[in-house]
Amino acid sequence: MINWKKQARYYKDDYLKDLKELIAIDSERDDKNKTEEYPLGKGPSDALKKYLSFGERDGFKTKNLDNLVGYIEYGEGDQTLAILAHADVMPAGAGWDTDPFDMTIKDGNVYGRGASDDKGPGLAAYYGLKIMKDNNIKPNCKIRFIVGTDEESDWTGMKHYFQLEPEPDFGFSPDAEFPVINGEKGNTTFENTFGNKQADNADTLLDSFDSGLRENMVPRDATAYVLTRDKDEMNADFTNFIEDSNLDGDAEITEKGIKLHLIGKSAHGMEPKNGINAGTYLATFLSEYDFTGDANNFLTFIAKYLHDDSRCNKLDTAYSSGIMGDLTMNVGIMKFDTQNGGFINTNFRYPKGISVSTIGEHLENAIKPLSGIVNNVDNMDPHYVDPADPIVSRLIDVYREQSGAKSAEPEVVGGGTYGRMMKRGVAFGALCPWTEDTMHQANEFQPIDDLLLAMSIYAQAITELSK
């Protein structure tokens, strides 16, 4: 009988070396520099190629599908077991104590962008497959380790795979948490827009407002430039606001006005309560001033209906399901300028029982009196796999055995993973219940011991599933 944990420890140094090479690649999707060869930018493609180079080195069959997605294959059979990982990362953002693209080991933890989401876990799953092969364990099905390149945006890469290749019969994504995620809430995004008009003779003008990097990330930073003669008074008010809110920030007085900068805390958009949204806080501060026209409407909408209300009570849309939990909302991007007007991205994770149209109607009711427009731009329906399905029961058994958590049960989350692309697909690790979740945050990390445990769990799980 194979000692899976001993096998994982044996591969520790090789794994960390490969992980360092992966983390060194800034693989954020880069549409501004996309080309025919690199349709999502060079970084995501380079990270995909790095994964495939590991597979080639280790004797697997590999294939690159147009620099969008690729796979590493082992075994043969009528059925296909898929392991769906992603090579892209969120923007690094500010607030790091180390270089996010130079892997740092400190106090037993690996720090770097992708350490937890998803390069650390994805590579651990790959090494689980490698352990199986190196021990000459022959699967009774085809196993494909499939690597996408834009999971953090609109899944162009993995959708490309499903357009070119048959849907796998079953599988998991190592892109969430343990024990097993057998259900994922629906995921829908609305864009809320405003005009750019302000009164020409107004004493206070909003020249610009900028907060947020991605829809599924709580904004850490927010900046606004206000044209006003009362800049000294606003500076004093802002200082008091920062102190009262227990936040950090600074102000710079200019010839024509004042530039404000507020610092919150980034977090994964599936649970906004884990972060502090700098954008909604700054808009709430500014909403107390006499802005006019669309600038006033933009700030009022954020302050009145969006600020500090991830459960949508202010929109009168609060909803909870016994199995899937609460409807949640993340305000991911907020922008305003005098040419383009206002833009607010709201991302909702919704359980079964409430519809996208209902969410849209409540947004419309709130924004229409403020002369705003609502547009639904993306949606993925809720996903659920019966706990009795072997893809769930076998994985939970392996996790219980290796972790010692005998009472662990499958869970439903607000996050969205590639697992939902398969009818019999789930998410499986690698964040352990005892470890802080730093996905989408500065100073992202994962304990090395957790990653080795995940490698051990994946090796056994892939073996069990492919019998």
Image: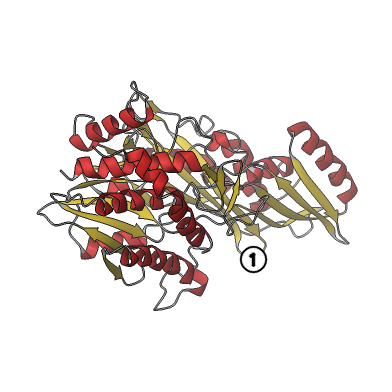
Q: How is the image coloured?
A: secondary structure
The picture quadrant where one finds residue 236 is top right
Q: Position of residue 204 (x, y in %)?
A: 79, 52
| Residue at 44%, 43% in the rendered image | 451
Q: Nearer the viewer, residue 335 or 37?
A: 37
In the image, farthest residue toward the left:
78
| Residue at 52%, 71% in the rendered image | 32
| Residue at 84%, 57% in the rendered image | 257
Residue 332 appears in the rendering: yes
Q: Is residue 270 left or right of residue 159?
A: right
CA neighbours of label 1 inside 10 A, class few (<14), some (14 to 19), many (20+): few
Q: Position of residue 237 (x, y in %)?
A: 83, 40
Q: Secondary structure at mark 1?
A: loop
Q: Is residue 258 left or right of residue 11?
A: right
Vertical placement of residue 32 versus 107, above or below: below
Q: Which residue is mark 1?
A: 339
| Residue at 23%, 63% in the rendered image | 163
Residue 359 appears in the rendering: no
Q: Nearer the viewer, residue 115 or 27?
A: 115
Q: Position of residue 445 (x, y in %)?
A: 55, 45
Quadrant containing the N terminus is top left
Q: Position of residue 467 (x, y in %)?
A: 15, 43
